[in-house]
Image (cartoon, coloured by chain):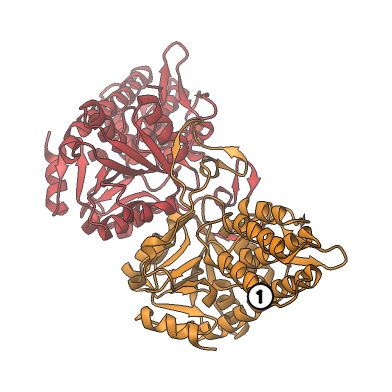
Chain colours: A red, B orange
Amino acid sequence: MIDTMRWLAEDDCLELLDQTVLPGKISYLKCRDYCDVAGAIKCLAVRGAPAIGAAAAYGLALAAKQLGPVDKISFIAGLERAVHELASTRPTAVNLRWALDRCLQSVHALETDDTGVLYSFLLETAHNIFHGDVESNRRLGQYGLELIPKGSRILTHCNAGALATAGYGTALGVIRAASEAGKNITVYAGETRPLLQGARLTTWELLQEGIPVTLVTDGMAGYLMAKEKVDLVIVGADRIAANGDAANKIGTYGLAVLAREHGLPFYIAAPVSTVDLSLASGETIPIEERDHSEVTSLAGIQVAPPGVNVWNPAFDVTPHRMITAIITDRGVARPPYLENLREALERL
Amino acid sequence: MIDTMRWLAEDDCLELLDQTVLPGKISYLKCRDYCDVAGAIKCLAVRGAPAIGAAAAYGLALAAKQLGPVDKISFIAGLERAVHELASTRPTAVNLRWALDRCLQSVHALETDDTGVLYSFLLETAHNIFHGDVESNRRLGQYGLELIPKGSRILTHCNAGALATAGYGTALGVIRAASEAGKNITVYAGETRPLLQGARLTTWELLQEGIPVTLVTDGMAGYLMAKEKVDLVIVGADRIAANGDAANKIGTYGLAVLAREHGLPFYIAAPVSTVDLSLASGETIPIEERDHSEVTSLAGIQVAPPGVNVWNPAFDVTPHRMITAIITDRGVARPPYLENLREALERL
């Protein structure tokens, strides 16, 4: 499996797979400071809620290295500036904030004033978040297995795969686990306009794994279900509110409505770091709106008339009542989510 | 308004606006024989159910010209070969077959053996179909007015505009009529992957008319409705069965499900030539599947990994129970469609 990101110890820098040019080109961006990481998150070179959490943690380690030998108050102030910049790159995914908070807390908890030690410790925390994410995805995949009958034909949206995480994936983690368990599944990948993460990334990951995949445009999902070509839907999430409402890539909500219309299970797969208990419902999840050019052009080619108005929300919110179950790295949560998500978070 | 097609009398040929290169380029294809017309329909240089009906009628006139001075039996046989070729270009839209049948019938009804006269007569029939379509769209637009409250925010899909017809449009005809009537409407245009007729053609038509339009990707429709940004949906149709089931551009069915979920009216706008009483339900409407490359590339750029499997139906079928009303050029038909569509067809 290809590395979504890797830390180059000999060079003290982070390499991020540039997902904007996949699958045509495999190229890594070298991030030598936290601003490079912030830029890579903003332009979606690295994307997917768990992956941007891990990348941001490495970004904070780079910020610590940049600060060099200063007193601890200046060091903390410098880190907080970096946290602010990294956290504000993308507003919807809560894993970003979760990872940065975890890093900051670990620094606050240390007694030492030695910024070299603090840097090493931050880097260690980033490694832990990175490796922890892979493990948590594998656990999540195993928990998800029980929900996937043999021979299932699964529709997914966007990319909640190895590329969206530190490795293995959330929705695609369940799909990988089901495939590894010999369940003979097949997958439909929604292309996911505007940025085509389904067409470019999900199909590419699944082809590499030898899992049968068929690409469809987003508008085909309804007819796919009406023609009884799909048995269940699994997608990832960028933030899940306390009541189970889930923000995910734009188009997810429509799939949930269609799944219910056709009596199909609709699953969210996400680690507990995606759950934000501070929000009572999905109403208050901030939804990022991105540049119009993502919709009006592709690879620099204008496809819509100049000057046309565009609405380009990057995410939507699926109400908890439409979600059959939320597959986490601490087990499968079913309704009522208000109790069962909290319980999953407290589980070890 | 730009011409979708025009007959050049001085040159005895049909010019078709090449819609595959809009909005970047305005260029006309010269069709000197019926094979040129068939090719233009196949590659979607001309598209939209009523437009391909009119283009095919001109194609048949070109076939008559090509046949030259032969006996009537050979002439009819030659025409029938052309009808077969023209009709088989695209299987879903019934207007194509309707127009060709009307032309053939007009030839059978004539007493003369003079193929020059027969050619003139076929050309006249094509002109009648062409001009009749513009008139019927204007009538349809007026009938549709009653369904559009002042200030409506209307979602449409694909292009059911002047470009999809001989002029004025069906779904966009209603939108034009509502705008001309001072109803202060605004429009959301779904981009309509894979071929982006919404992004390329609908926004372009509406910008030219000065009707406010906002472009969205197909996956945004659900969230658009959830955020209460749209009041009703109007789309065209390629074939309507006797019970009101309607085939239209892929993605339409999903919009109908979403509209019902949000309590929004869902209207089909189509001339009666789109109604096929020979089919009891939408189950038996043939659905064209098109080339994989339409999905795996966008604007000529490969966006998916080579070799990925694709499902690419060009249309889907919306069940009659999800359609609030069908706006025709002979009035608005409401459920039960089995009676009310038939009645509309018999109306003059």
Q: Is residue A257 visible?
A: yes
Q: Amino acid type of disc 1?
A: Ser
Q: A190 or A141, which lies in front?
A: A190
Q: A312 or B207, which lies in front?
A: B207
Residue B332, image x and y in percent?
A: 47, 84
Residue B220, image x and y in percent?
A: 44, 57
Tell me the quarter of the picture where residue B29 sits.
Answer: bottom right
Residue B132, image x and y in percent?
A: 65, 79
Q: A342 or A222, which lies in front?
A: A222
- Name the residue: 51% across, 59% down: A311
Q: Residues within 10 Å of mark 1 (few under 14, many from 20)?
A: some
Residue furthest toward the right? B10
Q: Which residue is mark 1?
A: B106
Disc 1 chain ID: B
Quadrant assignment for the C terminus of chain A: top left
Total labels drawn = 1
Q: Is residue A37 above or below residue B154?
A: above
Q: Secondary structure at mark 1?
A: helix
Q: Is residue A345 visible?
A: no
Asked if residue B64 lies left or right of residue B216, the reply is right
Quadrant assignment for the N terminus of chain A: top left
Residue A310, image x and y in percent?
A: 55, 59
Tell me the quarter of the picture where residue A329 sits.
Answer: top left
Residue furthest toward the bottom? B348
Residue furthest toward the top? A10
